[in-house]
Image (cartoon, rainbow, N blue to C red):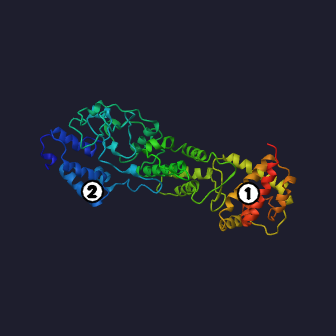
Amino acid sequence: MLEMVKFPVRPARQLGESLAGFIARHYAANGHTTPAAVHAALAIVYQSGDNPMRATAWQTVCTITGDAREEDRRRWIERPFDGANARFYRKAWLRSSYSTLKICPECVGAHGLHLALWEFPLIEVCILHKSVLVEYCVCGSRLTWRKLLAGWKCRCKLPLADLVAAKASIAQIAMASDVLRSEGIPLPESHRNLHFANGTTRPKDLATHYEDVAMVLGLRALIVQTNAPRAMPVRPPARAMGSLMASWPGRFEPVLARLLRFKLRRKAGLLVALQLDDSVIKLLMHLRAASYNNLLSDAARSCLTQLVASIDTRMYADARVVFNPSLEIATREQQLARLASWWCGSIAPMVEPSHSALTTAAVQTQVALRPEDQTVYPTIAKILNLLVEAAHAGLPAERLRRFAMAWPPMDDVRHLEPSELLVHLAAQLQAATPAHVGFLAELVEQSLQRVPK
């Protein structure tokens, strides 16, 4: 293959022009199509996961072009984005592809260039014209480098500049802006004066931004999945994320909290008993783990920390019975306060006293170390929810006399905070036998059945 310097027409590579676009433009200027061997080398450079093979193909491309730019070497050989965290979500969106060609018809028509920024993950739009990058011709053919004709024409000979691009969504524009704002993105002159809103809140390092996106995608996937997940269509991140990244980071925490509450909107009661494989447990574990992920940006960790604090549903150390995340914090605190006042004033005086007082720390340790009977958790949640309902209804103490007399002996709990009282009550139930717990559930349920609606 002839090196580019030996061709009669030698166009210069423009600022922000992609490697594949420059090579295609060079051969077209000399009346040739890009050789199959060059296509093969570029395909390996763009999408191969084999480092030695990619390095060899890179040397071939550099020999042909006579230009080994540092930004190209870092982009295609070092691959700084491949290390983005994949434990939350499949990272197929991070992989580059040579088999597809994305263009902005207006930019191609005005400058005759293919921009390098269109090849970066999460760039689905032309930020200059606020339009979605086009991947298909009106003839139905997918645009590819191998089928591209000279003069930026589809194989049906229609100029790509004549294609019509759809209007981009706010989320797509926001995600593209985040990428373009990062360091190391080759911006052409036409894009250098663009204004990006809220530029100080996004991470400047592109790998860190991709890490943030992978984390948010993972949390979103955990929220929308069910306990028996079914096949879900995989959409590009910018279209799948909706307002999550568009509102990043200021409204990220409340938006994600609303999604979680929407998932559990059919859960009734203050408490919810979860199975070990429940998707909510997985979500809570991922939330806490992500808040300590040092690969994320400071803004992301801050938002996650606030989110964990605002929906801290864990009632036990093993997180088997949790506060209902679909309840607002104010509602939860109100129900806890009402339960504590009602219990201490009406029920506690009828319960047999105990002289072996448990501290809050001891209660939590005891609960965490007693998971022998897994079936008791739903019953515990049921009893505590019924007690909350009884407190809300102001059930007279006399109706619960049998229940109070059957309750395990307990010490004075008037000094406990409402949340500590709830944990104390739950610990006593878990320390009892399953038969005893079931009997208590029947008693409180029978008492509530006599309450007028």
Give the residue displayed 42% in from the left and 44% down from the top: 236
Q: Which mark is residue 325?
A: none
Residue 407, above or below 125: below
Q: SS class of the residue under badge 2?
A: helix
Residue 44 vs residue 416: left or right?
Answer: left
Name the residue at the right extreme: 398
Q: Position of residue 317 (x, y in %)?
A: 64, 62
> Which callout, 2 or 1, points at the residue further toward the start of the chain?
2
Q: Amino acid at mark 2?
A: Arg
Q: Is residue 333 visible?
A: yes
Residue 133 vs residue 10: left or right?
Answer: right
Q: Is residue 66 visible?
A: no
- Give the spatial CA distance, label 2 vs label 1: 60 Å
User: Could you say which is closer to the camera, residue 277 or residue 50?
Assistant: 277
Q: Quadrant of residue 316?
A: bottom right
Q: Which quarter of the rendering shows the C terminus? A: top right
Give the residue displayed 28% in from the left and 44% down from the top: 18
* Badge 2 density bin: few <14, some 14–19, many ≥20, Cα 10 Å: many
Give the residue displayed 21% in from the left and 38% down from the top: 149
Q: Amino acid at mark 1?
A: Leu
User: Could you say which is closer to the camera, residue 143 or residue 69?
Assistant: 143
Q: Position of residue 201 (x, y in %)?
A: 49, 45
Residue 428, above or below 138: below
Q: SS class of the residue under badge 1?
A: helix
Residue 288 vs residue 355: left or right?
Answer: left
Q: Which mark is residue 54?
A: 2
* Badge 1 density bin: few <14, some 14–19, many ≥20, Cα 10 Å: some
Residue 66, above or below 196: below
Which residue is disc 1 drawn over? 422
